[in-house]
Amino acid sequence: MPNKRFIFLSTVISLIMLVCACQQPAHSANAQSISTENLGVAIFAGGCFWCTESDFDKIPGVVSTTSGYIGGTIVNPTYKQVSTGNTGHIEAVKVEFDKTRTNFSRLLEAFWPTIDPLFANGQFCDIGPQYRSAIFYLNSEQKVLAEASKSALETSGRFDRPIVTEILPATDFYMAEAYHQDYYIKNPLRYTYYRTSCGRDKRLEQLWGDNH
């Protein structure tokens, strides 16, 4: 007959596995199964890329997310280098999406309520230029749409302070280390603790209400 400690540990493991299963992105397709002409790419920076990746994985039509670094001067930077804030890189997420199910404009609409667009030098509890929010455009169409989306938010009257989220041309995107990919799935308890202690969702609720 199993002892109480064994039962307790088994229960904890089962709960962790259940959390992991619930966190899995509900994508019925992946990037490899979509034709080239129907596969779109967008790059967003919203502070900690663990959180940005998690947020975009929940959006219908998104088929792949990759955490990485963009905008800096060092080739193939490491997390240790980027986290100093001295390389010029920003933590960002490359989003691949099925253009038959969503588009760049919808991704923009989904992006804004996941960030604090009033925070100039970081996001939430993460301070430094490597955590600032930004939209990276890969072509002229994305640039026009991103600028129009930002302008609409500025004139909406929602905020009485400037929108400081940058709109920048995409440069080389470097994939982050393997342990950063799908971090919220691999480490659900640590991720939840980080996101809560950082005050991310509390601040988002203040800024966006139920829309976040």
Image (spheres, grey):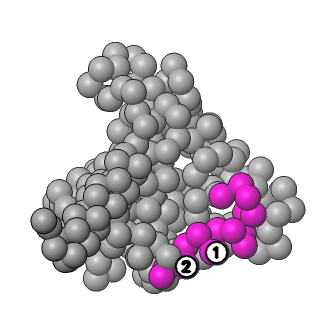
Residue receiving disc 1 = 203
Q: In this view, does 104 lie to the left or right of 184?
A: right
- Between 111 and 41, the residue placed more toward the observer is 111
- Between 117 and 66, the residue placed more toward the observer is 66
Element marked by disc 1? helix
Residue receiving disc 2 = 199
Q: Residue drawn 46% across and 72% down?
A: 195
Give the answer, above or below, for where 201 lies relative to 135: below
Give the answer, above or below, for where 209 lies relative to 40: below
Residue 210 image-quadrant placement = bottom right
Please state, as top left, top right, bottom left or bottom right, where the N terminus lies in the image. Answer: bottom left
Magenta stretch contains residue 147:
no
Element marked by disc 2? loop
- Between 33 and 90, the residue placed more toward the observer is 33
Disc 2 residue crowd, few under 14, some 14–19, many 20+, Cα 10 Å: few
Which is the main secondary structure of the residues drawn in magenta? Answer: helix
Please state, as top left, top right, bottom left or bottom right, where the C terminus lies in the image. Answer: bottom right
**Farthest left residue?**
1
**Count of residue discs:** 2
Give the answer, above or below, for where 145 lies relative to 118: above
Q: Residue drawn 34% across and 61% down?
A: 15
Q: Return the x and y of residue 140 as percentages of the image width and height.
A: 53, 36
Residue type pointed to by label 1: Arg
Q: Residue drawn 73% across and 63% down?
A: 208
Give the answer, above or below, for where 155 lies relative to 84: above
For the residues labelled 1 and 2, say whether their Cβ atoms are less than 8 Å apart.
yes
Please state the extent of the stretch shown in magenta in the rendering.
Answer: 197-212
Residue type pointed to by label 2: Gly
Q: In this view, does 126 lie to the left or right of 30?
A: right
Q: Is residue 132 visible?
A: yes
Q: Residue drawn 30% across and 20% down?
A: 33
Residue 201 image-quadrant placement = bottom right
